[in-house]
Image (cartoon, rainbow, N blue to C red):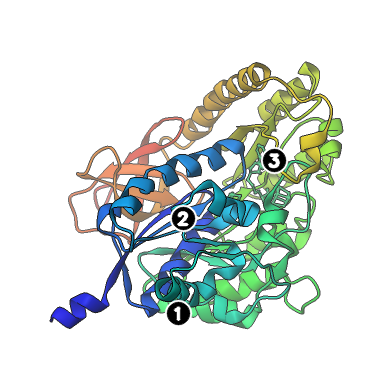
Amino acid sequence: MEQIKEGVKKVFLETFGCQMNENDSERILGFLKDIRYIRTNEPSSADLIILNTCSIRDKAEQKVYSALGRFRELKEGRPGLIVGIAGCVAQQEGQKLLKRAPYLDLVFGPHNIHRLPDLIGEISEKRARLVAVEQSASIDENEYGLVSASGEKAFVSIMRGCDNFCAYCIVPYTRGREVSRESGDIIDEVARLAEGGVKELTLLGQNVNSYGAGSDVSFPELLRLVARVDGIRRVRFITSHPKDISEELIYLFAEELKLARHMHLPVQSGSDRVLKEMGRGYTASEYAAKVKLLKRLYPEMAVTTDIIVGFPGETEDEFEETMALLRALRFENVFSFMYSPRPLTRAASFEGQLPLEVRSERLQRLQEAQREISLERNLELVGRRVEVIVEGTSKSDESEFSGRTSCNRIVNFPFDGAAGPGDFIEVAVTEAYPNSLRGEVPQQGK
Ligand code: SAH
Ligand code: SF4
Ligand code: F3S
């Protein structure tokens, strides 16, 4: 008994940033399980603390440093504790982090997750302080495929890295060059997840439409294969780059009903001059034409987007062009950000960096306008019946359930019958808010 206790160690893992990082955290836990680590929510009882970090904006990076600061005291009290930083800040800062935080033992980037058992072993043996940020040009399948099913939905990385080098973006530096996983390996992983009870799948990549460049399986073909796996009922994917979204993909929604009726298509700006400076490879009207086609073919399809306000040199008129695009396309939801200069990126040295007040005021205006639009879009669903996958209990009321529609809306509803995560239920929408819906389960026979 004592021996089992001694053999098992505890890891506290905190994840920042995007779904890609969430997925990497699952892989981190998978590799740690092999060397007998179990997860704890209590940093004070952990033998290993890992922060899986994001560096997309300066604020995200600063959040990491303040989180890290909290562990200094713990480490002082328990010198045997191992503290590590993973993810995009680890890749960006590397060795510099060891200087910045003398109590840090390990810095490892997104390409080095599979080395974790060896790195931990070396640290425990030699009390070495290690940095593992080498990037590799190919994917070794041993790095993937370890994620086990733990619920009704799962994420699967189909590729890593990005070759687009948008002028503002740090991702191509932190995640390296774009590489796709073999379709067979992806399908094997999906089949394993489905066997474990997963029903809704999200395929992940920075630019999923360029999946398989140079191989024989295109992204739409991969989607067909994935949707065919027994047990999978809904398939989502993020992120689509507007310049690469193909007609084949757009028309696939008509044929493949398991594809969720939602497309996340980041536009970034409504001004052609700004889009050009960003290096996005499309104009506002080319973008709008694609959204309009999607909406015309599939009226129930939700289209969401990302917007950056206050890009260097953005004039008031150019910002107004973004506002006009927002009003014209009436997105279901918008993720909007103040431009933040990032190390290594071209835009960080562009002229015309805008003061914080200008960026923040524009962001506020945009978010206010979008809140209205999101609410109007949600109101359109009131009185309709939607199918949701139950995800759990509602965040605000434990006695209610929360489910997600195919078009990616959250619906909260009271239900006294037996239901649990993974069940498909039809719900009648009764009320709408900017970020969610309320509904009720229709009585049988009505
Ligand atoms: N690969 C995805 C996006 C990844 S980053 C794509 O190409 O769409 C997610 C979002 O963060 C981006 O869409 C962008 O809106 C925002 N973002 C990226 N870099 C940023 C920066 N330097 N400042 C502010 N927002 C940024
Ligand atoms: Fe960043 Fe552009 Fe690549 Fe998206 S496509 S990750 S915004 S460089
Ligand atoms: Fe994701 Fe943040 Fe890295 S958004 S790719 S974790 S910089």
Residue 418: % across, % down: 20, 58
Real-space CA distance between mark 1 and mark 2, rounded to the nearest whole angstrom:
36 Å
**Residue position marked by numbered label 3 in the rendering:** 342
Residue contact between numbered discs 3 and 2, judged by CB atoms under 8 Å: no
Name the front one of labels 1 and 2: 2
- Whether residue 183 can be seen here: yes
Identify the disc placed on residue 277: none
**Camera-side residue: 278 or 101?**
101
Q: Quadrant of the N terminus?
A: bottom left
What residue sits 62% from the left and 17% below the top? 361
**Camera-side residue: 196 or 39?**
39
| Residue type, label 1 | Arg
| Residue at the left extreme of this rendering | 1
Mark 1 nearby-residue class (10 Å; few <14, some 14–19, many ≥20): some
Mark earlier in primary sequence (3, 2):
2
Residue 204: % across, % down: 59, 61
Name the front one of labels 3 and 2: 2
| Residue type, label 2 | Leu
For label 3, being within 8 Å of ligand 1 is answered yes
**Residue position marked by numbered label 2 in the rendering:** 104
**Residue position marked by numbered label 1 in the rendering:** 192
| Residue type, label 3 | Arg
Mark earlier in primary sequence (1, 2):
2
For label 1, being within 8 Å of ligand 3 is answered no
Q: Is residue 98 above or below residue 385?
A: below
